[in-house]
Image (spheres, rainbow, N blue to C red):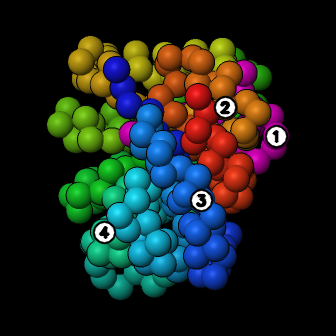
Amino acid sequence: MRRRVIAGNWKMYKTLAETRAFFSAFTPLVANSRHCDIIIAPPFTAISTAAEAAKGTNIAISGQNVSWSKEGAFTGEVSAPMLTEAGCRYVIIGHSERRQLFRETDDNVAKKTLVALDSGLTPIVCLGEMQEDRDAGLAEEVLLRQFTGGPGALTPDEFSRILIAYEPVWAIGTGRTATPEIAATAHRFLRRCAGEQFSVHHASALRILYGGSVKPDNIQGLMAQEELDGALVGGASLDPKSFAAIVNFK
Ligand code: PGA
């Protein structure tokens, strides 16, 4: 049985004071939630504050992005060892906003994944098709290309240490969630890619999160699909009550 993961991606929201306030309200609401891994990805500036607030709790901290270099003259970048030192155990890589707005490629994703693994972080590698891909019947082709260029380029051992998030771009921040069936079909396809590239064992151990307008009122339907191993939540992770309701979906 794959253990479920509920991860919150705060994107470019929350000051330090707001981060502290979130944790004070959220931590007690999930203190007894043992059925899944709980992750929060604050912006870089709030990572240490979040890690401090999460100390001794069942909440792990994640970065939202990482440099593909360990150090160097890369103005504005943050490295994997820096994230680890600040208290991260995970890092989101290749989020669609990074791919679309900051031109990240599958090759960037592959390099970032390697550097994250090397620093002991668990990468949450995001992939997903755009609306026009889906409309043109190209969703699987796009997923296969992103899988092959990113996670598929890892060694089997490296691959066994990552999580994948399927995030159809048309469902992110739009209020349009993929139906549980659409999500499950995409997850099954990605699992098949993992099986073909690596092994049946790797495929069945892989945890794939769904992301895109996950809310307290649709989490149950999504989690009823056994193909879905959890959720990557944007907007609804900003409010402690709403994110706790998603974590406590059962
Ligand atoms: P959303 O974002 O839940 O606000 O749609 C999901 C994500 O971008 O990870």
Q: Residue furthest right?
A: 175
Q: Quadrant of residue 1?
A: top left
Q: Residue at x 50, y 19 (%)?
A: 227
Mark 1 and 3 residues: CB-CB less than 8 Å, in contact? no
Q: Which residues are magenta?
A: 163-179
Query: According to the image, label 4 marks what residue?
Result: 84
Is ligand 1 closer than 8 angstroms to the Cβ of mark 1? Answer: yes
Query: According to the image, label 2 marks what residue?
Result: 219
Query: According to the image, label 3 marks what residue?
Result: 26
Q: Is residue 124 left or right of residue 182?
A: left
The amino acid at mark 4 is Thr
SS under mark 2: helix
Mark 1 burial class by Cα count in 10 Å: few <14, some 14-19, many 20+: few
The amino acid at mark 1 is Gly
Front residue of 167 and 88: 88
Mark 4 burial class by Cα count in 10 Å: few <14, some 14-19, many 20+: some
Does residue 44 appear anywhere in the picture?
no
Q: Quadrant of the image for the C terminus?
A: top right
